[in-house]
């Protein structure tokens, strides 16, 4: 990749942060609304004794929250990752960085990712995009993945699926044929587990089955209901006066499988084999607790964490603490002493309306 190409990626990363912080880029409405947790007026457990600890990909973590990978690759990202990593270390929760593609080509951009190593984060997720793996081919993809993992001393590699976003970018990578084979080769050759995530359009049960069949160790459903990259790229296209991509972004604004449906489908299809993470429109610990009751191992938050981390390290710590306290409250009020108990039958009420995807 040329220096020009790398700086274009850095510019894009900067745009993503700015657009997210300055605009409403949420899609899909309130996807959690059809669900309720059943109140237990006689909880028979002390709130302070509720146990939020769990295990994720072989690591003990302090609570069922994943700070989803967002950024890196531009100067502005360094303080965001630093603040998020400080919060993740304090509350013992896992954290991902954003796509490391730019830093693989441009060493100057590495610091914005490497900053996570200044903190004792219990589980760090490196990040690359599956569409780029296809372009690179299996051999180059393996070398780049190993470099990305080493850059942040990651415990897990997260590979993101973002074909919707790529469709709304004039420069988007839209090679899909062969993507499963490249993924399969990478899963076989790497020494760390691979988590595959969507980034707002969701993973359904059929795709989850195909991913687990090639050896993927965890799935983050990345469903509709929160940050929409169709919306983010639409704003970029608007600024660039690119009418075609602005229009595609607008048309596909609400595209995708809503997060709770994706969780239900993935848990049914592969939940007995791999952990399922629920990211996409989780606004607080109560949305997260619904995802856990539906069978997710943990839930992920990106946008809400970004807004806090952009303010200060204290704000990032306060956000993580508040979310975990909300989960604790939901467990207490459902009479659940721990996360396993929250998943017992009958804890969530009201099935969603008949679905048409
Ligand atoms: C500014 C921003 C940048 C993101 N960049 C990446 C990325 O580089 N790689 C990735 O896997 N996901 C990325 N994501 C997607 C998030 O990890 C997450 O899947 C998505 O935002 C949905 O979660 P939310 O509704 O809580 O924001 C990004 C999200 C935001 C808000």
Image (cartoon, rainbow, N blue to C red):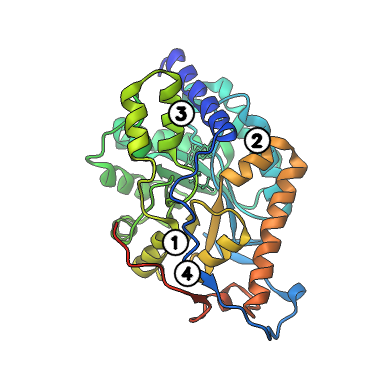
Answer with mark 2 or mark 1, whichever residue precedes in sequence.
2
Residue on which the image places disc 2 = 80
- Which element type, helix, strand or loop, lies under badge 3? helix
Q: Which mark is residue 64?
A: none
Query: For the residue labelled by badge 1, is the local secondary structure a helix, a strand or a loop?
Result: helix
What's the distance in space between the residues labelled 3 and 1, CA to CA? Answer: 27 Å
Q: Residue furthest left?
A: 177
For the residues labelled 3 and 1, say whether their Cβ atoms are less than 8 Å apart.
no
- The tag earlier along the polypeptide, 3 or 1, is 3
Q: CA distance from mark 3 to mark 4?
A: 34 Å
Question: In the shown orientation, is residue 251 left or right of residue 63?
Answer: left
* Residue holding disc 4: 294
Return the residue nearer the eye: 92 or 226.
226
Q: Secondary structure at mark 2?
A: helix
**Would you say the residues marked 1 and 4 are in contact, meaning their CB atoms lie under 8 Å apart?**
yes
Task: Tell me how far mark 1 sits from mark 4, CA to CA.
Answer: 8 Å
Residue 152 at x, y percent in the picture: 58, 38
Mark 2 crowdedness (10 Å alpha carbons): few <14, some 14-19, many ≥20: many
Q: Which tag, 4 or 2, sits closer to the chain's start?
A: 2
Rendered residue at 35%/46% (across/down)? 255
Identify the residue position indicated by label 3 in the image: 235
**Residue where numbered disc 1 is placed:** 260
Residue 10, position as x, y percentages in the image: 51, 23
Q: Residue at x 49, y 76 (%)?
A: 349
């Amino acid at each position: 990749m040329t220096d020009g190409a790398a700086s274009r990626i850095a510019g894009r990363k900067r745009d993503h942060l700015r657009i997210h912080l300055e605009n409403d880029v949420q899609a899909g409405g309130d996807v959690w609304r059809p669900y309720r947790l059943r109140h237990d007026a006689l909880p028979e457990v002390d709130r302070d004794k509720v146990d939020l600890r769990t295990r994720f990909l072989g690591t003990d973590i302090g609570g069922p929250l994943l700070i989803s990978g967002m950024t890196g690759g531009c100067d502005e990202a360094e303080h965001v990752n630093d603040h998020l990593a400080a919060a993740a270390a304090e509350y013992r929760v896992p954290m991902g960085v954003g796509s490391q593609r730019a830093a693989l080509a441009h060493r100057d951009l590495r610091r914005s990712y490497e900053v996570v190593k200044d903190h004792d984060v219990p589980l760090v997720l490196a990040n690359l995009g599956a569409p780029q793996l296809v372009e690179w081919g299996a051999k180059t993809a393996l070398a780049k993945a190993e470099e990305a993992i080493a850059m942040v001393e990651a415990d897990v590699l997260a590979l993101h699926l973002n074909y919707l976003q790529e469709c709304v970018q004039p420069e988007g990578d839209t090679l899909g044929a062969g993507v499963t084979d490249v993924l399969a080769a990478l899963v076989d050759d790497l020494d760390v587990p691979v988590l595959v995530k969507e980034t707002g359009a969701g993973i359904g049960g059929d795709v989850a089955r195909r991913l687990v069949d090639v050896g993927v160790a965890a799935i983050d459903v990345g469903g509709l209901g929160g940050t929409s990259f169709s919306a983010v790229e639409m704003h970029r296209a608007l600024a660039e006066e690119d009418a075609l991509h602005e229009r595609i972004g607008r048309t596909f604004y609400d595209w995708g499988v809503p997060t709770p449906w994706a969780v239900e489908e993935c848990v049914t299809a592969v939940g007995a084999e791999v952990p399922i993470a629920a990211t996409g429109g989780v606004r607080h610990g109560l949305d997260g607790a619904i995802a856990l009751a539906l069978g997710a191992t943990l839930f992920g938050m990106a946008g809400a964490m970004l807004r806090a981390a952009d303010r200060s390290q204290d704000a990032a710590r306060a956000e993580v603490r508040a979310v975990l306290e909300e989960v604790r409250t939901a467990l207490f009020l459902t009479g659940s002493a721990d996360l396993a108990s929250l998943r017992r039958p009958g804890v969530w009420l009201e099935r969603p309306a008949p679905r048409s995807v």
